[in-house]
Each structure stands twice: as C-alpha cells, then as structure tokens.
Image: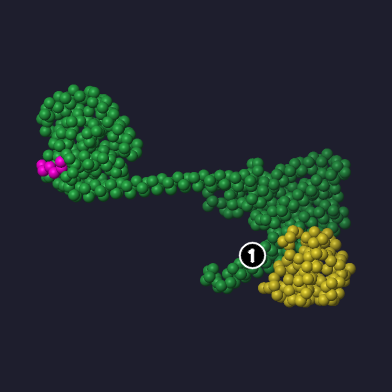
Amino acid sequence: MQYAAEQAWYMPMGPAAAASSMESAVARVDVSSCCMCHAVKRLFCGMGVHPTVHELDLDPRGRELERALARLVAGFGAFGSAAPVVPVVFIGGRLVGAMDRVMAAHINGSLVPLLKDAGALWL
Amino acid sequence: MVQGEESSWRMASAHDHERAAVHLNQAALPYHGGVQAHASAALPASFLDFQPAAAAAAYFGELEEALIHGAANAGGVGHHPGSMITSDMHSAKSAAAGYLAARPPTLEIFPSWPMRHQQQLHSGNSQQSVGSTTDSSSARNTMAQMELVSPGPASSIRPSPPSSSEQQPQQQRQEVMMVTTDDYSYKPAFAPPPATLAAAPSFQQQLQLPLHGGDHDKRKHGLARKDGKLVDSKTERRLAQNREAAKKSRLRKKAYVQNLETSRVRLQQMEQELQRARSQGTFLGGCSGSGDLSSGAAVFDMEYARWLDDDGKRLAELRGALQAHLVDGNLGLIVEECMRHYDELFGLKEELARSDVFHLLTGSWATPAERCFFWIGGFRPSDILKILIQQLDPLTEQQLMGIYGLKQSSEQAEEALAQGLQQLHQSLADTVAAGTLNEGAAVPNYMGLMAIALDKLASLEGFYQQADNLRKQTLHQMRRILTTRQAARCFLSIGEYYRRLRALSNLWASRPRENFIGTDSLSPTGTELQGLHHQPQQNQFSGF
C-alpha cells in the first residue's frame, strides 16, 4: 500500500492559497508513503473528523510549501532534525503543528475543543 | 693394540668422565630443543655412576645379547617396526651407544674409550662395514633417539671396556651403529632427527666413513675410508635429501612460530582496543555485559542505572513525605522533583533515539517482566492510567471526568500511532520483498531497494519519538488533573508498580531450575534469558 505524503488542511494559510475549503472534505491521492501521516489520519478518523488532505507530492508548488511549513513548524519545538515536516495540521485557519504538537494537544484535551470551534467536530 | 687400550680405558674411565660430560655438553649444543640438554644432563650423571669392570661386564653381556637380537632384526634394508619395538629399549641404548661411538673425534662421549681409540674404531668399523643403513644421518638420528629416550638408556650405556676380546666392542659398536641406522629407518617421522641431521653436517663427512647404506651382509665389506671422500653415491644422495628435508622443516617451523607471534600480538592489540572501547562506553561499574552495545546504548544503560537509583530515593522520599503528612507546599516540591525526574528519563531516551533507536525499541535495558508490557519502547499510557484510576479512589467528579477523558485521548492517540506503525511495517516488508527474492542480491535495483528500505526504517525513529512524547504528555496531564497529594500518591504508585515488576523479574530469574545461568535451553522464555544476560544487575532496571 502506498500513501501520499499528506497534510490535513482545515484552513489554508495565506501563502498556501491553493488549499481552499473550510469545510472538511476528504480528498486523498496515494503517491508515496508517509506512515506518520497515516497515523494522524487514523487519529482524526477515530474522532470522526475528516480533514481536507493536501498532498505535497501532487502539488506543483509542493517544494516551497514544504519549506514554508518547515519554517513554521520549527518554531513549535518539533523533534530533532530528522523528523519529517509532514504531517502538519491546521485547524480553523491556525497552525497546530506537526505530529507531536497534535498529540500533545489531544492529550491536553485542547484538540477536541479546537475541532469543535472550527466546526469539524460535532458532539 | 686394542688390548692395551682396554686397560687404558679402564684407567681413563675415571678422569674421562668429566671429559665425557664436557664433550657431551658440547655435543648437545648444536642440536635443537631441550631434549638434548636433558639428555646431556642425564648422561654425565650416568657416567659418574659408572661402575667399571664387573658391572660393566655384566651390562655388556646384556647389551651384546640385545644387540645381536637387534641386529638380527635389522637385517635387510626394509622397515621392521614390529621387531624393533620389541627390542626398542635395547636398541635405544645401543643406538645411543652407537651414536656416541660414531661421533667424530672431537666429541668423546664414552669416557672409557679415548679419542684415538674411537678413531681407530671408526676405521675398524669401516673395515667391518657397519650394517644396514649406515647413514651418518642414522647416527645422528640415534643421537636424537638417545635424547628422546634419555636418562634410562643413557644411563644404561656404560662404555664398559670389554673384559673379553677386543673384537666384541668393535662388533658391538658396529652392531650398535647398524642398529641405530635401523632405528632411523624404523622411525622416519621423527622431527628432531631431520633437524639434528641438518645441524650436524660436520659429522657427516666423518661419519660417512664407516657407514654405508646397504645390507647387513655388507658389514664385512667395508667401503668407506677415513679420508671421507669415498662415499657411496646412494648414501650421498640420501644425505643430501635429508639435509634438504631438515632445512625445509626448519623453515616451516620458523614460519609457524612467526605466525604465532604475529597472531599473539594482534590478539593483544585487539584486546586493548576492546578494553578502551568498553571503558569509554561504561564509566563506573558498567552494567552492560554484552559486547555488541553501541556506545550510546552503553551510556544510556549506565545513565538509566543511575536514574533507577535516584528513583528509589525519590520513592522513599515520597513515602516519607506522605506518611509525615507534610504541608502541600513541601509535598508539591517533592512532586515536582518527581516530575522532573521522569522528564529526565524521557530526555535520556530522546537523546539515545537519535543515534540508536533500536536499543530502546528492543528493550534490552529493561527487565523481562517489564518487557512483557512494552509498547513502542516503553509503557503504554492507558495501562498506567488504568492502574492509577484504581489507586486514586477519592476523586472528585471533575477529576474523574478529567482522568477518563485523558484515558480516552491516550487510547485514541495510541491507536493512531499503532496504525501508523503497522502501516510502516507493511510498507517496509513490501519494500524488502520487492522483486524476486529467489535471485538473492542479484536483483538489478537491489541498492535502490535497500535505500528505500533504509528510509522507511529511519521513520521508525519518528514513531518512537511520538510514543515517548505521548507518555510524557500523559504524565504531565495527569499531574495537572490531580491535587498535590493525589499526585504524590500517583507517583508513588507508579514507582512501586515498576519496582514490583523488577522484583518479579528477579524472582523469575532465580527460581529453582538446574543450571539456570549456564544453559540457554532450559529457559521457557527466551527473552528473559536475553535480559538476564544483558543485565547482571537486573534488579536495578525497569522499563518505564
């Protein structure tokens, strides 16, 4: 099985104008594999959230998006230099961060409220 | 002539003892090995014990018999190992005697037979054409044989001047020499003989005189002369061959010894390197017994041991503080200390994960019982929460909600990570199995395949980091939900839980089974043995 390197964008960033919808929509194209992205996808699916997926592989501006994201994520205390940039999660137009931040937010209990506020999750 | 010398032998026997000893020592010098030295040491003593005349005569009679017996056996050129064995002792004695007799004039072994007599004996022997092999090599060989058999036959060699006719000693000598040559032919595998052969080339010329390759019957027909020129061609060829063989064996021996020396030096160097590497990896009282730990893993093991010591102290402190019913402020300090303590461990693990994640994942740093509950290199957060919920009974509604929410979140996160990991496993398996496995490494894109697999394996590190992060976040969140007192009890519970798991591992290791430490096959659980082999101080370890 092969999975694309995905990001789940709830709300596109300014520079990433290609990403559009505020609605949760499921779009997934399998190109290359990133198992951590699969993990975060599973996490959201388990919660009943279906994020919009943007794959850097398929995006023609994927490289610069990746670089922009790396800059964004680096300030959030990502693990070491070997950690891949993706997956990156945006909720309600705001950057949540890479996988570790998402996890921490979930454990904190702050992820669910965020999702609810963004309208991606209903009770 | 000989009779006159008979008496001279007897008279000379006394002061010839010393000369014989000296000569024997000189004789021993050019020869290899300590056997000669041993023999040479033995011989002078024997000479000193020499009892002239009567005893000698008695011995001589025996010897004569033996020689004749041996001579009869030695008939012909062929090998008669069987017969030689029976008369081995005698032949050994006679061999030694014969060899000594066959020495050049410079080496006088038989004290009672002065040098000039020996020379005459040589000539006499030449006349009588010593028997079968008559090689100088054989004479030398008999020297070797004498050395090998050493004190027994040597001591029994008493150069007794014959009380009877003079012919007998000569006869004896020749027979002895003949027998000695037979000994040589019977024991061709002697290593020293070739060596001694080569070592005594000087003897050759002089010994060639009386010795002939050939038959027992030729004894009566002397060929060699004292001048050393007229040597049988066959003999000469054989001598040359012996010389070559001796040289070759010497070279081989030298090469072998050199090889041994270099190997020894290399082994020493390797041991030193190993020592240095070990000492770098382990500081004081290193616990890693196995040699295949990476340096980072060894450091981690050591740090972890230290952490466990600290953990014990913290637990004791907590227990004391709870029992003493400290003010919340002070207790809070202690709880914060505990929290920092756990964070320290997570930091250690994160550091090692960058270099050697597999050491953490396999859990060789943890005790076997803890390893049963391993989940991506550590404890499973929801498991801990399940345990804690039972321990923290008086919880408020809000706290209960918080704890159950935490439990659910952690379960979801764990599930997500587990799914991602499973995805990784499948992907890695597919990559490694790509192409036809039957062709082995000859698949065209083998290296590309390996590169992809390497990347996938590297992402394993990411999963481990995320799992550890999950554990850490769970602990922190739990601390936030609970009051100080509850948190103190919580940390105490966790600490005690793992201490019990460690104790369980210890008990498991030391339960009565025969030869537990030695045998691998008896253990029902392979992983436990691995853990024990890796951790001699396993009562210190836990898998947190």
Q: Chain B is drawn in which colour?
A: green
- Residue B175 lies left or right of residue B541; in this view the side is left
Please state which of residues B520 and A15 is positioned toward the viewer in this rendering: A15
- Residue B108 lies left or right of residue B388; in this view the side is left
**Residue B43 location in percent, x, y?**
28, 30
**B224 in magenta:** yes
Q: Which residue is drawn at 76% across and 43% down?
A: B315
**B316 in magenta:** no
Secondary element at image label 1: helix
Tag 1, which chain? Answer: B
**Residue B401 location in percent, x, y?**
85, 58
Q: Which residue is drawn at 27% across and 25% down?
A: B18
Q: Which residue is drawn at 21% across and 44% down?
A: B135
Image quarter for residue B470?
bottom right
Residue B169 visible from this viewpoint? yes
Q: In this view, does B302 lie above or below A14?
A: above
Please state which of residues B325 and B209 is positioned toward the viewer in this rendering: B209
Look at the image and give the residue range highlighted in magenta.
Answer: B220-225
**On-image quarter of the N terminus of chain B:** top left
Image quarter for residue A42?
bottom right
**According to the image, label 1 marks what residue?**
B454
Q: Chain A is drawn in which colour?
A: yellow
Which three-letter amino acid code belongs to the residue tagged 1? Leu
Q: Which residue is drawn at 27% across and 47% down?
A: B242
The residue sitting at the right extreme is A117
Chief secondary structure of the magenta span?
loop
Q: In this view, does A68 lie above or below B248?
A: below
